[in-house]
Image (cartoon, helix red, strand yellow):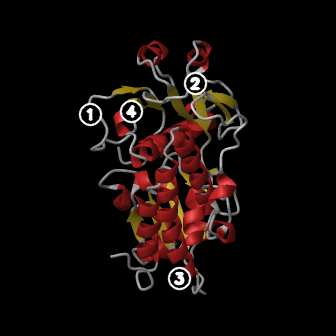
């Protein structure tokens, strides 16, 4: 039970940090937009459309979407990037403040939203995340039963998945032009970085910590964080394991990474890692290569992944990457 609790705590931390799969060959390929089009079952203009959401559920999209609720920071960031801030009437409590978001917008619990409040907001659509669920329980079941459309986006495990999320949200909100532009801007950075990464022969190894002691967690393969590490030409020391990884200190020390990065907020996190008993034998510690990175950009699968890509690239290979 303690292990389950700690995992749920970490998943929550992924969104609350700093406030909240492709392998490398697949990540750096250009993703044709036509390959990530939403599968539309009915496409008549100006009538409700029946589509498959990103989780594979069949849902009916309203003709006009003027009132949107976003249940995860990543979805909120995509909506804001598409210029839809004026249509957002509710967000989860981890969504960051934004100039285009009403500062008085209704906020609600990430996993246990007040259903009456959501219904009272009279949304045309709720854009939900797989992270909102606990097991197979659907927290928006009652909302669906009163006729409100709910679409789900599972947590993207690659940069390609982020492209697909953006494309899906853009299509259902009739902002395809803006969505394509957003994807192209990310792809340009991916192409630039991958071209440089291809020249790297001695790859640096990275341990990325997303939850500190006593419940230490990191990310393994099939996460978009792993995709970023691969993209810049480095290696993830926990790439031999899948998804969220509960890591023991002994295993971390044995992996002896070149760099230790943390997404955990707090002014003392780097000092805390440097002071851990027995960790001084690692190259990252002895060489002073321990850094705190942007927790939001590194934890939220949205267009702001570009910030994480650039930050890691310049941090790990300062002689190769310069985005100024």
Residue ID for mark 3: 196
Marks 3 and 4 in Cβ contact (< 8 Å): no
Residue 11 position, x and y percent, is 54, 41
Label 3 SS:
helix
Badge number at residue 103: 1
Q: Nearer the viewer, mark 4 or mark 1?
A: 4
* Label 4 residue SS: helix
- Above or below, 156 against 126 in this view is below
Q: CA distance from mark 4 to mark 1?
A: 13 Å
Q: Specify which label sits upstream in the sequence, 3 or 1.
A: 1
In terms of depth relative to the viewer, which is nearer, 230 or 271?
A: 230
Quarter of the rendering containing residue 109: top left
Q: Which residue is mark 4?
A: 87
Q: Marks 3 and 1, Cα distance to the nearest angstrom? A: 41 Å
Q: Do the residues bearing badges 4 and 2 touch, measured as CB atoms within 8 Å?
A: no
Residue at point 49%, 66% (across, down): 279
- Observer-nearest residue: 314 or 266? 314
Residue depicted at x 68% and y 65%? 23
Task: Say which label, 4 or 2, has the lower sequence index.
Answer: 4
Which of the marked residues, 1 or 2, is nearer the chain's N terminus?
1
Where does the N terminus fall, quadrant-wise? top right
Q: What is the x, y in percent for residue 128?
A: 55, 33
Q: Residues within 10 Å of mark 4 (few under 14, many from 20)?
A: some
Taking the image as shown, residue 103 lies to the left or right of residue 119, namely left
Which sits in the foreground, 56 or 202?
56
* Residue to which mark 2 is pinned: 149
The 10 Å Cα crowd at callout 2, few under 14, some 14 to 19, many 20 or more, is some
């Amino acid at each position: 039970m303690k292990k389950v609790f700690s995992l749920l705590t970490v998943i929550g931390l992924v969104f609350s940090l700093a406030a909240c799969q492709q392998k490398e060959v697949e990540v750096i390929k250009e993703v044709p937009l036509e390959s990530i089009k939403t599968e539309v079952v009915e496409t008549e203009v100006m009538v409700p459309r029946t589509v498959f959401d990103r989780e594979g559920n069949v849902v009916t999209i309203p003709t006009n979407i003027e009132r949107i609720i976003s249940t995860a920071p990543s979805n909120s960031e995509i909506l804001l990037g598409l210029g839809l801030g004026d249509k957002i009437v509710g967000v989860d409590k981890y969504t960051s403040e934004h100039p285009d978001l009403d500062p008085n917008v209704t906020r609600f619990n990430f996993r246990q939203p007040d259903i009456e409040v959501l219904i009272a907001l009279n949304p045309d659509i709720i854009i939900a995340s797989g992270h909102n669920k606990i097991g197979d329980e659907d927290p928006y079941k009652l909302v669906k039963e009163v006729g409100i459309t709910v679409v789900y986006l599972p947590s993207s495990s690659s940069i390609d998945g982020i492209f697909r999320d953006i494309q899906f949200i853009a299509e259902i909100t009739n902002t395809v032009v803006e969505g394509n532009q957003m994807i192209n801007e990310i792809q340009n950075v991916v192409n630039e970085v991958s071209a440089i990464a291809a020249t790297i022969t001695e790859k640096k190894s990275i341990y990325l910590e997303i939850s500190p002691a006593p419940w230490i967690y990191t990310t393994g393969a099939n996460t978009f964080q792993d995709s970023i590490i691969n993209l810049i030409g480095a290696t993830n020391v926990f790439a031999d394991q899948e998804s969220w990884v509960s890591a023991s200190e002994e295993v971390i020390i044995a992996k002896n990474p070149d760099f230790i990065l943390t997404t955990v907020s707090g002014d003392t996190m780097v000092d805390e890692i440097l002071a851990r008993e027995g960790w001084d034998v690692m190259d990252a510690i002895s060489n002073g290569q321990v850094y705190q990175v942007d927790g939001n950009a590194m934890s939220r699968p949205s267009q702001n992944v570009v910030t994480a890509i650039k930050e890691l690239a310049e941090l790990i290979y300062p002689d190769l990457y310069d985005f100024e």
